[in-house]
Structure formats: C-alpha cells, structure tokens
Amino acid sequence: MSTVVEQAATAGNPKPAEISTAKTSISTATAAAAISATPLATSAPTAAEIEQLQQALIEKQTQLYALESACLRETERQVELEDSVIAWQDKYDRLYESHKRVQKVNQSLEDKMLKLVDRNAGERAQLTSDVATLSVRLAQANFNIAKLQREIERYKADISLAIQLLQCKPDSFVSQKVSSLPIDIQSKVSAYMRLETNSHSDSECSNSGVGVATTASYKVLPASDSPPPSACPFPPTAMVYSMRGIGRC
C-alpha cells in the first residue's frame, strides 16, 4: 500500500481518472493487508484491530485527498506557467525581430558614417594643402608688398629731389664729372646717357630717311636690392639735370 501511495505522490500531474484508479488501488491494498493481517483461524478480528484498520484507512484517505489537492494546484500552476512561457516567448520573438531591424539600421548608419569620415578626411587633406599653398603665396605677396613700399619711398625721395632741383637755378651748382660720382650712380648715368644717345640717333635717322625708325625704351636701372627694372619717366638723380641743362626757374 505504501508503494502505491509513493507512486501516486511522485507522479507528475495526474488526471482525475488516474486519481480514481489510485483510490481504488489503495482501498484494495488496504483490504488485502487487513485480510492478510487477520489469522486464518476461525476466530473473528477483535474490535481493536478493526479500529486500527479504520484509523489507517482514514489517514490514507486524508493523504490521498491532500495529494489530489496538490495535484490540482500544480495543474493550475502548470497552466499558468505555460501561459507565462508563451507570453515570454512572444516577447522574445518580438524583441529578436526588433533587434534584427535595429542591427540592420545600425549597419547602414555605420557604413554612411565611414563614408563621411573618408570624405571628410580627403577634404581635410585638400584644405590643408590649399592652406599651405595660400600661406606661401601670402608670404610672397607680403614680401613683394614690402619691396614695393621701399621702392615707392625711394621713388618719392627721387621725385622730391628732382622737383627741388628743377626749381633752383643751374648757376648755383657746379658741374660734376661722371667719374666723380659713386659707382652705382655712374652706371645709372651711363645707361641713361646711352639711351639718350640711341634715341637721338634714331630720331635723326628717321628724319633723314637713311635709317629705319625704332622706338627706344627709357628705363632707370634699379638698385641692387630693387625688383626688375620698370619704366620710369623721372630721372633718378640730380646729375641728369646738370648734364641736360634744364631751364632755370
């Protein structure tokens, strides 16, 4: 009888039909135990033995009812757990689908970001190269501006000196020789005199019809630290005034 009760207790979730079968088995086992416990003699069982058997039967029925109640509770709990598992499975499926969609979106955004990074890196390198080139050009332009400003100041000084000399009388000055001037002034005066000579010879040839008319460009040789020579209509020094003999003020 105890074996049958243990089997009923260790069963998973018995059905009502199985519970009834277990009850019948327990009753049969109890009766068989009572019969086997009774001696085969012709004497009838005593009242104490009958009471003990009834008490044991009541205890077994109580245990059986408890097992039946526990089985019913476990059955209800199993149904609830199955519903909960289904709900969590549904949530998991939805979360998994959402995760896959988000993963695709993240992959697309990552590709776009990498493309933007590559493009920005190329633009940055190009801008760096442009800035370096423009910096070199700016430095060259500043250097040229400084040189031009120095040339402008020098030309202003030469023009101011020439104007002052033009406003004076030539008798107040002593004629100087070219050999007495500084070397750089001598070269400038010699070049200017050659230009004047060439221009006069060209004009005479064009007037007489012997030579071919040519145009001479009058240039002032710059100093050693000045830019390439450019056309200037003003004489560089006062020596030109003394040589050409410009009229008095």
Image (cartoon, grey):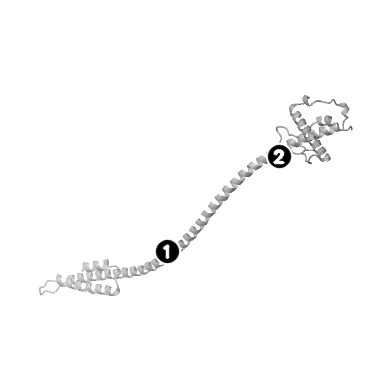
Mark 2 neighbour density, 10 Å: few (under 14) some (14–19) many (20 or more): few
Front residue of 139/157: it is 157
Q: CA distance from mark 2 to mark 1?
A: 75 Å
Element type where label 1 sits in the image: helix
Q: Which residue is mark 1?
A: 92
Q: Are marks 2 and 1 in contact (CB under 8 Å)?
A: no
Residue at 83% x, 30% y: name it: 243
Residue type at numbered disc 2: Ile
Q: Residue 151's spot in the image, x, y percent?
A: 74, 36
Residue at 53% x, 54% y: name it: 115
User: Which dot marks residue 145?
Assistant: 2
- 214 relative to 188, above or below: below
Task: Say whether residue 98 is left or right of residue 46.
Answer: right
Q: Residue 10's spot in the image, x, y percent?
A: 26, 66
Task: Say whether residue 6 is left or right of residue 198.
Answer: left
Quarter of the image holding residue 36? bottom left
Q: Residue 33's spot in the image, x, y percent?
A: 17, 70
Q: Residue 4's spot in the image, x, y percent?
A: 22, 69
Residue type at numbered disc 1: Tyr
Position of the N terminus, as image quadrant, is: bottom left
